[in-house]
Amino acid sequence: MRTIHTENAPAAIGPYSQAIAVNGLVYTSGQIALNPQIGALKGDTIEAQTEQAIQNLKAVLEAAGSGLHNVVKTTCFLQRMSDFAAFNAIYEKHFPGKPARSCVEVAALPKGALVEIEAVAVCD
């Protein structure tokens, strides 16, 4: 088992890791739209926050020796299900292989984020 950490994604803000790699898979913690350089949310629209969350997820996966192209499952949390179509428009640009996915509305996300995404991917 290997703990994953990269400066190219937001640091964990609690007792958890950015990701864990084990048995050829990497399991990421949820990524919100925190800009890793300044620690503040990037953007105030679902589109901007989805893009940043995916860039953070990409950085964590790459630090584990994987990438978005190796994702087999995502879990997506939206503050408002009314943002679903706009979220999908950004998401599908980054996941053309269409991994398995769950997408749910939640009452609130850390730091008031509009979206959070976690993933399971195969390591190269």
Image (cartoon, rainbow, N blue to C red):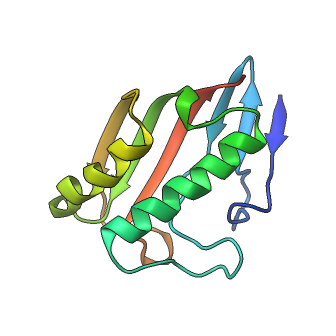
Where residue 50 appears, as percent x and y from the top left, is 41, 61
Given residues 104 and 44, the one toward you in this image is 44
Where residue 109 appears, as percent x and y from the top left, is 42, 67
- Looking at the picture, does residue 82 appear above or below residue 97? below
Quadrant placement of the N terminus: top right
- All told, the count of numbered labels is 0
Where residue 64 appears, as percent x and y from the top left, is 76, 37
- Looking at the picture, does residue 23 appear above or below residue 34? above
Q: Residue furthest left?
A: 82
Residue in the image at 54% along x and 52% along y: 30
Where residue 115 appears, as percent x and y from the top left, is 39, 62
Given residues 83 and 47, the one toward you in this image is 47
- Looking at the picture, does residue 102 appear above or below residue 106? above
Using the rendered image of the protein, determine whether residue 108 is visible from the camera's viewpoint.
no
Q: Residue furthest right?
A: 2
Toward which corner of the image does residue 90 lie, by quadrant? bottom left
Using the rendered image of the protein, determine whether residue 120 is visible from the camera's viewpoint.
yes
Residue in the image at 56% along x and 56% along y: 55
Toward which corner of the image does residue 35 lie, by quadrant? bottom right
Residue in the image at 36% along x and 53% along y: 77
Quadrant placement of the C terminus: top right
Residue in the image at 40% along x and 70% along y: 48
